[in-house]
Amino acid sequence: LHRDGPDAEVQLGIVDSVPKLLVSRVLQRAWKEQPSLRIIVREGLPQELLPALAAHELDLILSTEPVPPAFHRVLHGQRVAAFDV
């Protein structure tokens, strides 16, 4: 994960059920904090993205679901927001 300098890059996985408005706000905030940040987004199902995160192919995942028990030994999940539907 390269967070500093002109070559700052983050590999971001987004579960397809995450609202696009939320994704937009997260990306806008990231670019406000670090305008040169390059964010590579990969959208998919949790069963595709979680193994990629565990294999260090992704730096972070935005999801609407907690980390499944099968991944508890290698991944940590944290709730960062709650939204009404």
Image (cartoon, grey):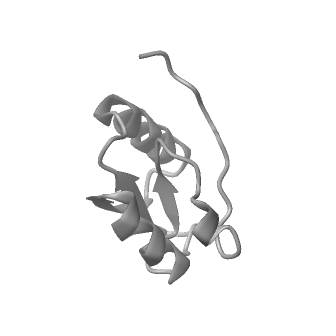
Q: How many numbered marks, from 0 up?
A: 0
Q: Position of residue 36 (x, y in %)?
A: 43, 58
- As drawn, is 42 to the left or to the right of 12? left
**What is the residue that sits farthest to the bottom in this orientation?**
55
- As drawn, is 16 to the left or to the right of 80? left
For residue 73, which quarter of the picture? Answer: bottom right
Q: Position of residue 19 (x, y in %)?
A: 34, 33
**Relative vertical location of residue 59 with respect to residue 56 in this rendering, above or below:** above
Residue displayed at 60% across by 70% down: 71
Looking at this view, is 35 or 55 the one in front? 55
- As drawn, is 30 to the left or to the right of 71? left
Residue displayed at 47% across by 41% down: 64
Looking at this view, is 35 or 12 the one in front? 12
* Residue 63 in view, yes or no: yes
Residue displayed at 29% across by 48% down: 16
Quarter of the figure that contains the C terminus: top left
Quarter of the figure that contains the N terminus: bottom right
**Relative vertical location of residue 84 with respect to residue 73 in this rendering, above or below:** above
Q: Position of residue 31 (x, y in %)?
A: 45, 46
